[in-house]
């Protein structure tokens, strides 16, 4: 929607933990079905890593994340 309604040239899809697979699904649908031929994954547009933070119980946990940058084709 950022590409179609907001006129964005770049959109970053971010997800952590068990939602990573959902982010990958969103990127695939956007590039292969919804905006076919109009957007692509940016060069060096996939970043992965892990973050450490404190959960509700006060315990330190490490969670993986993914960031996928989509760009509008010129």
Image: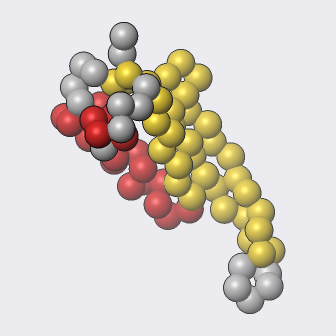
Residue 3 in the image: above or below residue 39: below
- Is the image coloured rainbow, by chain, by secondary structure, or in one colour? secondary structure
Q: What is the total number of numbered labels drawn onto the structure image?
A: 0
- For residue 70, say whether it is visible: no
Q: Position of residue 50 (x, y in %)?
A: 70, 53
At horizontal 52% and vertical 54% (from top left) the residue drawn is: 15
Residue lying at the far bottom of the rendered structure: 57
Position of the C terminus, as image quadrant, is top left
At horizontal 34% and vertical 24% (from top left) the residue drawn is: 39
6 or 74: nearer the eye? 6
Residue 72 is drawn in which quadrant? top left
39 to the left or right of 60: left
Residue 4 in the image: above or below residue 9: below
Position of the N terminus, as image quadrant, is top left
Residue 11 in the image: above or below residue 71: below
Q: Position of residue 17 (x, y in %)?
A: 56, 62
- For residue 60, say whether it is visible: yes
At horizontal 63% and vertical 42% (from top left) the residue drawn is: 48
Q: Position of residue 42 (x, y in %)?
A: 49, 23
30 to the left or right of 55: left
32 to the left or right of 43: left
At horizontal 19% and vertical 34% (from top left) the residue drawn is: 33
Q: Position of residue 2 (x, y in %)?
A: 36, 40
């Amino acid at each position: 929607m950022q590409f179609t309604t907001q006129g964005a040239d770049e959109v970053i899809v971010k997800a952590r933990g068990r939602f990573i697979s959902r982010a990958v699904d969103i990127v695939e649908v956007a590039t292969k079905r919804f905006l076919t031929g109009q957007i692509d994954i940016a060069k060096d547009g996939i970043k992965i890593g892990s973050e450490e933070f404190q959960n509700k119980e006060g315990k330190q946990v490490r969670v993986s994340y993914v960031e996928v940058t989509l760009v509008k084709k010129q």
